[in-house]
Amino acid sequence: QVQLVESGGGLVQAGGSLRLSCAASGRTFRDYSMGWFRQAPGKERDVVAVISWSGDRAYYADSVKGRFTISRDNAKNTVYLQMNSLKPEDTAVYYCAAPENRWTYSRSLGDYDYWGQGTQVTVSS
């Protein structure tokens, strides 16, 4: 059974940085792409970033491009989201997610089958 556990959220002032981590277990981590999504109050859950199984491809939402970096350490079964120059509009619950299919590399919410419990990120102005 795949399990994803996020950590690293918190309260930060605008312009600050946070690094989120997502530890995966239950299958061969290096064979699958991973995604970070976020959901702000009253809004739908949206993609933030996606990384391929090998780490050689990454996708970023326009709203975070140039500020956030997704990376992975396959030896540690962990995917990261480095968030710099944070803005109040980045406030949300952040989730990591993994697909069932090892060939999936997608920005679509519906293509992800396994989700972490989420970690709150709050950016104050």
Image: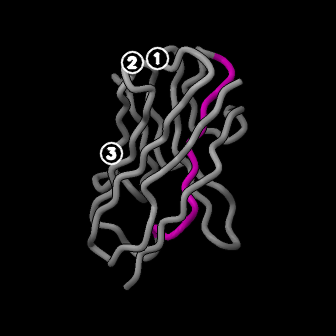
At label 1, the amino acid type is Arg
* Tag 1 residue: 30
CA–CA distance in space, label 2 to label 1? 7 Å
**Residue at the (51%, 25%) spot, across then down:** 33
- Is 95 a magenta residue? yes
* Tag 2 residue: 54
Residue 10, x across and y down, in percent = 44, 67
Residues 9 and 51: in front is 9
Above or below, 28 against 36 in this view is above
**Circles 2, 3 touching at the beta carbon (< 8 Å):** no
**Residue at the (45%, 24%) spot, across then down:** 52
> Which is more N-terminal, label 3 or label 2?
2
How was this image coloured? Answer: one colour
- Is 42 a magenta residue? no
Q: Which mark is residue 69?
A: 3
CA–CA distance in space, label 2 to label 3? 15 Å
At label 2, the amino acid type is Ser
**Circles 2, 1 touching at the beta carbon (< 8 Å):** yes
| Span highlighted in magenta in the image | 90-101
Residue 68, x across and y down, in percent = 34, 52
Q: Secondary structure at mark 2?
A: loop
Q: In the picture, residue 43 is in which quadrant?
A: bottom right
At label 3, the amino acid type is Thr
User: Which part of the image, by quadrant, shows the N terminus?
Assistant: top right
